[in-house]
Amino acid sequence: MTFPPLPSVDEVAAHFGRALVQSQCDNAPYRHWRLTDVLPESMAVGVLTLPIAPPFIDDCGGVRDLHNNSRCFFAPRLRSRFPACDILAEAMQRPQVARLFEDICEIKVEGGFLRMEYIQDTDGAWLEPHRDIKEKLFSMVIYLCTGPDAETWGTDIYDDERRWVGRSSAAFNSAVIFVAGPNTWHGFDKRPIEGVRRLMEINYVDASWRDRDQLAFPDRPIVVAR
């Protein structure tokens, strides 16, 4: 028996599509979209209850790729083991969802690939201000944080001089999307984490992406509904 009972791929795709259509766009300090009620509740809980322990990282160094061997991607092996991983990946792969990303974010995603990382940060984690590389066609963070201070665990936003200007809310089942550009500075300033800061980072990446083991469907490029 799967716990919790999981929604179908169609239900997840439709629910997420509504959240994306209803997203709020903000242009300061760079264009980004804020979403609420991103996933069906049972889908969000299905991710939270995955039997995957947070990695122990003594010093993250302010970057994630120093510890690639401890990162958790919804790649084929994980998808084959856990239905929650497979359902969410299949929903994000849907041509109708890809079309919404193209229309709303004004980007081309046809021929790209889906990359999904499950992140579980613990106390001591931080990320230096950085910009995503152009190979990421868009970046989305879905916050699955719980606990009394969880809403303060959102992404920190910086201006062109890398000065802190704000922070996204990490309210449960909310999300932020942006398209990488010359001024899209973001990170995570070090602050107390009592519990686990759980989130999903979801990207479509272009066909030149070298780390094929990070892709949800290495042999299935994104197709856009027409």
Image (cartoon, grey):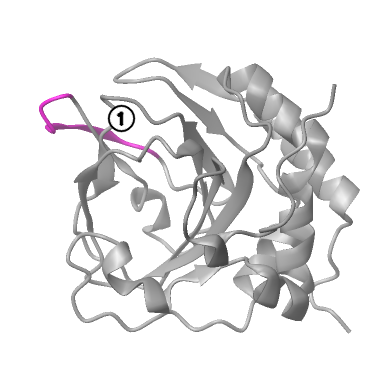
Residue tagged by mark 1? Answer: 184
Residue 159 position, x and y percent, is 19, 26
Circle 1: residue type: Thr
Query: Secondary structure under badge 1?
Result: loop
Task: Examine the structure image and report whether residue 147 is included in the region drawn in magenta.
Answer: no
Looking at the image, which residue is at 83% across and 38% down? 14
Q: Say which of 55 and 135 sits in front.
A: 135
Closer to the camera in the image, 219 or 60: 219
Q: Quadrant of residue 193?
A: bottom left
Reply above or below: 90 against 51.
above
- Along the horizontal axis of the image, is 129 left or right of 196? left
Please name the residue shown 86% across and 70% down the image.
5
Residue depicted at x 34% and y 20%: 30
Q: Quadrant of the N terminus?
A: bottom right
Q: Measured from the top left, where is residue 23 in percent x and y?
A: 60, 25
Q: Quadrant of the C terminus?
A: top right
Q: In the picture shown, does residue 53 fall above or below 176?
A: below
Q: Which residues are magenta?
A: 160-168
As displayed, is residue 169 above or below residue 73?
above
Image x and y of residue 72, in percent: 51, 71
Q: Residues within 10 Å of mark 1 (few under 14, many from 20)?
A: many
Front-most of residues 15 and 118:
118
Percent from the top left, x then y, of residue 105? 57, 22
Q: Is residue 193 above or below residue 173?
A: below
| Relative side of 163 to 188, left or right | left
Give the residue at x 23% y 65%: 192
Q: In the figure, is residue 115 to the left or right of 136?
A: right
Residue 88 in view in this figure: yes
